[in-house]
Image (cartoon, helix red, strand yellow):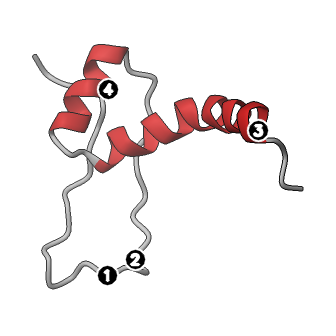
């Protein structure tokens, strides 16, 4: 089954750097396609996972640990 998450071609190891910014295509894939992308180590899938769940995780941490601000 083809993933709906569109990964970019990864850079070779010698061209990869910690400061490199790689634009990623955004999509609203279903959960199974997102998991497939994560298994394939797709940077676009990781970015989508973060964008989708970061606000929820942040709220849960604030409720559990309290605000640090």
The residues bearing labels 2 and 3 have C-alpha atoms spaced at a distance of 31 Å
Numbered disc in front, either 3 or 4: 3
Badge 1 or badge 3: first in the primary sequence: 1
> Looking at the figure, which quarter contains the N terminus?
top left
Q: How many marks?
A: 4
Badge 4 crowding class, 10 Å Cα cut-off, few under 14, some 14 to 19, many 20 or more, is many
Q: In the rendered image, is residue 4 in sight?
A: no
Residue at the limit of the structure toward the right, as seen here: 69
Work out whether 39 lies above or below 20: above
Q: Secondary structure at mark 1?
A: loop
Residue where numbered disc 4 is placed: 34
Residue where numbered disc 3 is placed: 62
Q: Which mark is residue 20?
A: 2
Badge 4 or badge 1: first in the primary sequence: 1
Is residue 36 shown left or right of residue 46? Answer: left
Q: Which mark is residue 17?
A: 1
Residue beneath the point at 31% across and 81% down: 17
Q: In the rendered image, is residue 33 in sight?
A: yes
Residue beneath the point at 77% across and 31% down: 63
Residue beneath the point at 37% across and 14% down: 30
The residues bearing labels 4 and 2 have C-alpha atoms spaced at a distance of 24 Å
Residue 62 placement (x, y as % from top left): 76, 38
Badge 4 or badge 2: first in the primary sequence: 2
Cβ–Cβ under 8 Å for marks 3 and 4: no
Quarter location, residue 46: top left
The residues bearing labels 3 and 4 have C-alpha atoms spaced at a distance of 26 Å
Badge 3 or badge 4: first in the primary sequence: 4
């Amino acid at each position: 089954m083809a993933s709906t998450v569109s990964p970019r071609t990864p850079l070779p190891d010698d061209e990869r750097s910690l400061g490199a910014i790689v634009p990623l295509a955004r999509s609203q894939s279903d959960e199974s396609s997102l998991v497939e992308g994560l298994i394939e180590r797709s940077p676009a899938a990781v970015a989508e996972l973060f964008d989708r769940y970061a606000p929820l995780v942040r709220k849960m941490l604030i409720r559990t640990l309290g605000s640090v601000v």
